[in-house]
Image (cartoon, helix red, strand yellow):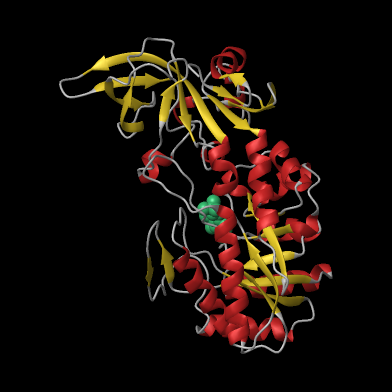
């Protein structure tokens, strides 16, 4: 193949039809990503549930796919709930997370039929209790626990982790008070415990440690609870990333949970996971047009027509990506270049150093694995319009989000009379 195709369509054709920058998602990859989780995360000893962490990429069309594939949903804000409702996502399959849900968001969630809440702290439990009383609601609550395990790509560290922004330590007074409050409540039912130990995890021992820790709390309860392990499955951004096969990882997580429960003579009713990146990341590619090319004494820059506004990850945490010139796949990669965005920030670098063929103005550059936390973290910095999102498959494409227009930038601005 000399030219990049996505979902059976040449990248160049997509760029011509929808302009660049462009977020392109391979719909089959999205569906297969979800199927792998749904089919691989099964136990004969307890129920299992896969929630898609929609912060990674949320649009109505994406949520329709999630719904069709039978997954649940992890949402973290009123806006994510609003989008889920707009997609007619079944309310009972939605879990509402977040460390500082506002009164408005909690009220909105309760009055729109959400029944699963992952509570972060004692004040949230107190507020939920008051609101459920006021609105005569009954909900299930998971407590987000800080299990003192910090997973990094290839290792994990055990930390005291007492000062994390997220969750509570099980032993803390706040957590024990929250449990007491739930126990006494006729509105709140304890569903179980949740933890999330990191992202881009390639090493299962961190998950095993998390499972052990969560299971250790169960002996304090007569009722059979559920456990939620969070998300964090790693994906391949560059050749340096070697993620474990998902199916095998899921099997091992299930087996470890089953064995640990058996050893400790304990039971759970349900095991939940919340993958985000691993479902959408590698299904997404961003297409850019190369503009000016500039040589400095030590560098060659290929400038592209987007950057940190459509993908903040490199600037935010030095995330690495791989790329190709879409029409020059078979050309020799002779140039060591820096791919830089067009925003007014020196940190607006898409890829710090990469080998590419010699390029010319107008070439299409494809950056791979941009499907997670790209569109969802996009901004209008420099009054840049947000690119369109297109789903492709079987040689066909469909617009899922239209490119913003300049007039969108003024939406919400209040117009005053000026002489
Ligand atoms: C609580 C929780 N669950 C799930 C996820 C999804 O993680 P990932 O996209 O790495 O799978 C996150 C990510 O921040 C999270 O905070």
Q: Quadrant of residue 159?
A: bottom left
Residue 360 percent coordinates (x, y): 37, 10
Residue 312 coordinates in the image, percent (x, y): 44, 38
- The one of 87 and 130 positioned closer to us in this rendering: 87
Query: Left or right: 175 with respect to 89?
Result: left
Q: Locate residue 91: give its quadrant.
A: bottom right
Q: Residue furthest left?
A: 297
Which residue is drawn at the image coordinates 56% and 58% (left, top)?
248
Locate residue 11, reporting x and y percent: 55, 19
Q: Pick the residue in front: 49 or 55.
A: 49
Tally of marks: 0
Give the answer, above or below, for where 403 lies relative to 35. Answer: above
Quarter of the figure with the C terminus:
top right
Q: Residue at x 69, y 81 (%)?
A: 182
Which residue is most to the right? 136
Q: Residue at x 81, y 53 (%)?
A: 90
Vertical order, 389 against 256 (above or below):
above
Quarter occupied by residue 313: top left
At horizontal 70% and vertical 68% (from top left) the residue drawn is 43
Q: Position of residue 169 (x, y in %)?
A: 49, 78
């Amino acid at each position: 193949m000399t030219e990049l195709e996505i979902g059976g369509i040449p990248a160049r054709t997509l760029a011509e039809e929808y302009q660049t920058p462009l977020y392109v998602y391979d719909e089959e990859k999205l569906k297969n990503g979800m199927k792998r989780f749904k089919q691989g995360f099964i136990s004969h000893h307890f129920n299992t549930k896969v929630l898609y962490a929609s912060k990674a990429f949320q649009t109505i069309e994406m949520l329709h796919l999630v719904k069709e594939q039978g997954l649940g949903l992890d949402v973290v804000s009123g806006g994510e709930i609003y989008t889920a409702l707009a997609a007619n996502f079944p309310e009972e399959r939605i879990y509402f997370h977040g460390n500082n849900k506002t009164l408005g968001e909690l009220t909105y969630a309760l009055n729109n039929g959400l029944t699963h809440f992952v509570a972060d702290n004692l004040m949230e439990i107190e507020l939920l209790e008051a609101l459920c009383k006021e609105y005569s609601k009954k909900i299930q609550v998971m407590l987000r626990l800080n299990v003192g395990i910090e997973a990094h790509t290839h290792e994990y560290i055990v930390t005291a982790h007492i000062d994390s922004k997220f969750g509570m330590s099980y032993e803390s007074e706040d957590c024990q008070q929250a449990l007491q409050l739930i126990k006494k409540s006729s509105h709140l039912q304890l569903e179980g415990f949740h933890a999330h130990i990191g992202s881009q995890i390639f090493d299962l021992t961190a998950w095993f440690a998390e499972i052990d820790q969560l299971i250790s709390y169960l002996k304090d309860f007569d009722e059979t609870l559920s456990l939620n392990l969070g998300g964090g499955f790693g994906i391949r951004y560059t050749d340096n990333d070697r993620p474990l096969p998902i199916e095998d990882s899921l099997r091992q997580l299930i087996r470890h949970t089953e064995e640990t429960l058996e050893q400790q003579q304990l039971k759970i009713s349900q095991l939940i996971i919340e993958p985000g990146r691993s479902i959408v990341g590698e299904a997404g590619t961003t297409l850019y047009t190369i503009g000016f090319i500039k040589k400095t004494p030590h560098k060659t820059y290929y400038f592209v027509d987007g950057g940190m506004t459509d993908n903040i990850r490199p600037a935010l945490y030095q995330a690495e990506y791989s790329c190709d010139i879409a029409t020059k796949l078979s050309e020799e990669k002779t140039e060591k270049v820096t791919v830089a965005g067009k925003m007014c920030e020196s940190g607006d670098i898409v890829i710090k150093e990469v080998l590419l063929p010699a390029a010319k103005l107008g070439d299409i550059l494809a950056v791979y694995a941009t499907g997670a936390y790209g569109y969802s973290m996009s901004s209008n910095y420099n009054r840049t319009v947000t690119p369109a999102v297109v789903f492709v498959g079987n040689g066909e494409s469909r617009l899922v989000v239209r490119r913003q227009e300049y007039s969108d930038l003024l939406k919400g601005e209040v117009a005053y009379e000026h002489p």
